[in-house]
Amino acid sequence: MSTQTFTLPDVGEGLTEAELVAWKVAPGDTVAINDVICEIETAKSLVELPSPHAGTVGELLVAEGVTVEVGAPIISFVSDAVAPATPAPAPAASGEEGGGSVLVGYGTGGGAVSRRRKPAERPVRASVGVIAKPPIRKLARDLNVDLTEVTPTGADGEVTRDDVVGHAQQASVFRNIETPEWGDVREEKLPAPVSAPAGLARGIQPAAQDDDRSESIPVKGVRKATSSAMVQSAYSAPHVTVWKEIDATRTMELVKRLKASPDFTDIRVSPLLIMARAVIWAARRTPMVNAAWVDTDNGAEIVVRHYVNLGIAAATPRGLLVPNIKDAQDLGLKDLARALNRLTVTAREGKTSPADQQGGTITITNIGVFGMDAGTPIINPGEAGIVAMGAIAQKPWVVDGEVRPRWVTTVAGSFDHRVIDGDGMSRFIADVAAVLEEPALLVD
């Protein structure tokens, strides 16, 4: 028996500090190697930390909500064993969930055994006999999916992430289907009316009556990272925005047909999917929108990427995230839809990895889900263009000289004027609009 102190590790993204969001254990709890002990929030991600020790929790050295530097002690254990340097791979067998994060210096592995729970804490759905790895079981529970009802497609009958995602009947974090459950929504309260002091009639201003008239919110985590990135982009790249109103009726008809197609069973389809294909297609015709301005020791250069890592701005309960789909230009319509679904679920869980948020080349922001017609979005740092898709609504539209009801939307694009000129961005937005007006252009 020995006492071990666990310090905050670097989770593999050059981390310098993180906020300890929630403890999953308490002093006196018995834990096994790789049991989740807490959640931390880095600049962009919510990460579960697995225990490197087996034994009993001694003391929690950091309170929830406190920001901690890497290397600072956060918890102590009375340990029975220490994690091996290279853990054995996790078997594809049923069991309780374990940590899904692999950290610098130690990792997940072995058959993870959850800490001993009180009877009331045990999951309602045990899914006995289902073959699924611990992270998949956790995903299923988070999405309220009964694994016994999921059709497995993995090797030896194993349930995969795609199986769970396809089965889940949850709202999209991008809110293309319905508004998601945000949870823990703070009730806004106004201060009670205060009678005017007698001196007010003589022009004397009253002092503040209490502390309920305002509040201070610390800037940290996702909000801190977002604000820093937006300021950097807005004050370094000269932004210009162009937009075009279009008839998207044929896009809406295509979405309806895809939803009814057997090939897209259990795959969520929305106008965002067609928008994504349109942006990829148009970027190939105007490569400079997919480029980047890079400052060097000798001045600057423009790097033109011949691949598309398509970013999707996601409004999540934890703040704005911009995960991207790597090499999106190589994906067919069905695989692109699956990739969008995966981004949806991981962003909704707050488990988007740092790697998924790095290396983007061009971004889409779907402001239409908030009822907005158009906007002037700020470019994601390291990119030269961002496209905003407005709300799609029925409006009167002139077709062949007659006014008819059509599904109409507005597509806007902001661009870095150092990299691309107005004519290039205008051609790009015109191409995106052309695809939304006639999706058959994608068949080439």
Image: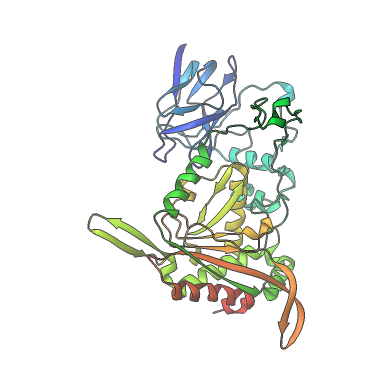
Q: Residue furthest left?
A: 298
**Residue 118 position in % (x across, y down):** 70, 21
Q: Say whether residue 59 is left or right of residue 307.
A: right
Q: Say whether residue 293 is left or right of residue 64.
A: left
Q: Residue furthest top?
A: 1
| Colour theme | rainbow
The residue located at (62%, 58%) in the rendering is: 367
In which quadrant will I find the C terminus? bottom right
**Residue 398 position in % (x across, y down):** 72, 82
The residue located at (70%, 35%) in the rendering is: 186
Q: State whether residue 134 is above or below residue 360.
A: above
Q: Nearer the viewer, residue 173 or 149?
A: 173
Image label count: 0
Please identify the quarter of the rendering in which residue 258 is found. Answer: bottom right
Q: State whether residue 70 is above or below residue 363.
A: above
The residue located at (59%, 40%) in the rendering is: 135
Q: Say whether residue 230 is left or right of residue 342.
A: left
